Image (cartoon, rainbow, N blue to C red):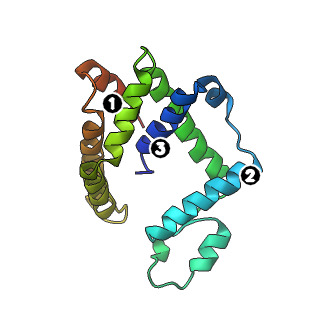
Amino acid sequence: MPQSYDAGALFLAQVVIQNDELEALEVARVLNQLQIIKMRHAMEKAHRLRLIPAGSDKFLKGIKGDFQYDPSRAILIDDNRLHYIWNRFRERSIAVAKTLTVHSLGLYKVNQLVANFKDSRCRNLLKQYRYQYDRRFKGSDLMGALLRKQILYFVVSPLSETEQKKLLNVLLKS
């Protein structure tokens, strides 16, 4: 669900909480060239698996003419866009980490949330999301939003009602 940054924020928050590196994440606004290369590689690999034509100019030229890709959905993602994506993940992760570390069980709680994202029931919801959400089709945005909420409610289910509201407030903000 990259459009919403939810899973990425939770996974990054888990690493930050585990290693007590919140301050380091707060100042990590700019990626170095090696980080950009690694991020681009991971992104393009994920997009290739899902037949999404989004990546560097080189990536888009490499898939040009491949009938499996829909050229109308092609998205050029340059270094500036990668920094933007990184900072969306980073900001959301900071908010998630701060929300979960209010008490000593923060690591335990974030581990539960990450486990829920990996749960087979959640993976099925994520497959539905990928299948249903296509910005080119009318009604797709609504279906994507509904499935996203369903996924997030499943993920935060182990938390208390108060904790759920706080975390959903962080995750559901645009």
Query: How many numbered markers are drawn?
Result: 3
Q: Between residue 138 and residue 78, name the one nearer to us.
A: 78
Q: Earlier in the sequence, mark 1 or mark 2?
A: 2
Measured as percent of width and height from the top left, residue 23 is found at 63, 23
Position of residue 140 measured from the top left corner of the image (x, y, whole percent) = 29, 59
Instruction: Give the Cα distance between marks 3 and 1.
Output: 15 Å
The image's mark for residue 168 is: 1
| Residue at image location 47% in from the left, 43% down from the top | 8
**Residue 154 location (% of width, % of height):** 25, 40
Q: Are marks 2 and 3 in contact (CB under 8 Å)?
A: no
Asked which secondary structure carries label 3, the reply is helix
Question: Which residue of the protein is positioned furthest toward the top in this rendering?
Answer: 103
Identify which amino acid the numbered label 3 is placed on: Gly
Q: Which residue is mark 2?
A: 34
Quadrant of the snapshot with the C terminus: top left
Q: Is label 1 in contact with label 2 (beta carbons under 8 Å)? A: no
- Residues 64 and 31: in front is 31
Disc 1, SS:
helix
Q: Which residue, given by chain and number where applicable, does mark 3 sit on?
A: 8
Three-letter amino acid code at the position of disc 1? Leu
Q: How packed is label 2: few (under 14 Cα within 10 Å), some, or many (20 or more)? A: few
* Circle 2 SS class: helix
Q: State the image quarter where residue 127 is shown.
A: bottom left
Q: Could you tell which of marks 2 and 3 lies nearer the N-terminus?
A: 3
Camera-side mark, 1 or 2:
2
C-alpha separation, residue under disc 1 versus residue under disc 2: 33 Å
Q: Residue at x 32, y 59 (%)?
A: 133
Q: Identify the disc placed on residue 94.
A: none
- Residue 117 in the figure: left or right of residue 147: right
Q: Is residue 77 visible?
A: no
Is residue 119 shown to the viewer in this render?
Answer: yes
